[in-house]
Image (spheres, grey):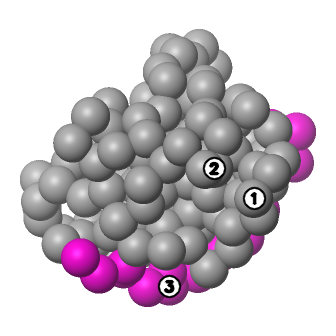
Amino acid sequence: MQSGAERAAGEAHSAPRLILGKPVVAALRPAVQVQYAVKPEKLRPKSYGGLFTLSVKTAARVGVGLSGSAWVDIVTGDQAVPSIAHGHGPECSGIRKIVWFDLPAGVHLLQIADSPAREVRVMAADAIANQPLPPPPSGRDF
């Protein structure tokens, strides 16, 4: 899959927008340069992180996939949204982890923290919009 490239912000007001379903190669910042809206649970001083915004038109279950090890939070207002599940991506997909959130409609802040690498691929996807299409009807029913 092709990716765009984006530099993660250090402050919420300048955070670039992620588009649902579009992967981005995120250039992260040294953690000490990031002003997190909510303190991440994991944050080593010699790590990297950054901020993005994510807009959801209607309430949705959204998965955030990362190619590398990092902590992910989504903040709405001044509260971290609790994750509802996490796991790994499909084999050979390049997705190391996926964290799932139930998000209300609106604009949210996506926080990446505690990455050992300066760069990570990130993608947010709507769980329903990204379901495979049902198989076509069989037989001569059409």
Which residue is at a point 25% across and 58% down the rendered structure image?
108
Instruction: Name which quarter of the figure residue 18 lies in.
Output: top left
Amino acid, disc 3:
Ile
Instruction: Name which quarter of the figure residue 25 lies in.
Output: top right
Residue 31 is tagged as: 2
Quadrant position of the C terminus in the picture: top left
Magenta-tinted stretch: 78-96
Q: Are marks 2 and 3 in contact (CB under 8 Å)?
A: no
Which residue is at a point 42% across and 54% down the rendered structure image?
35
Label 3: state its secondary structure: strand
The answer, for residue 81, to whether it is visible in the render is yes
Whichever of labels 1 and 2 marks the residue nearer the N terminus, that label is 2
Q: What percent of the width, then of the height, locates residue 72?
A: 57, 63
Which residue is at a point 74% across and 42% down the rendered structure image?
67
Q: Distance between the residues labelled 1 and 2?
A: 6 Å
Q: How far apart are marks 3 and 1 (CA)?
A: 27 Å
Whichever of labels 3 and 1 marks the residue nearer the N terminus, that label is 1
Residue 55, placed above or below residue 75 = above
Residue 84 is tagged as: 3
Which residue appears farthest toward the right when viewing the image?
92
Quadrant position of the N terminus in the picture: top right
Name the residue carrying label 1.
45
Q: Do the residues labelled 1 and 2 touch (CB within 8 Å)?
A: yes
Whichever of labels 2 and 3 marks the residue nearer the N terminus, that label is 2
Amino acid, disc 1:
Pro
Q: What percent of the width, then of the height, locates residue 106?
A: 12, 59
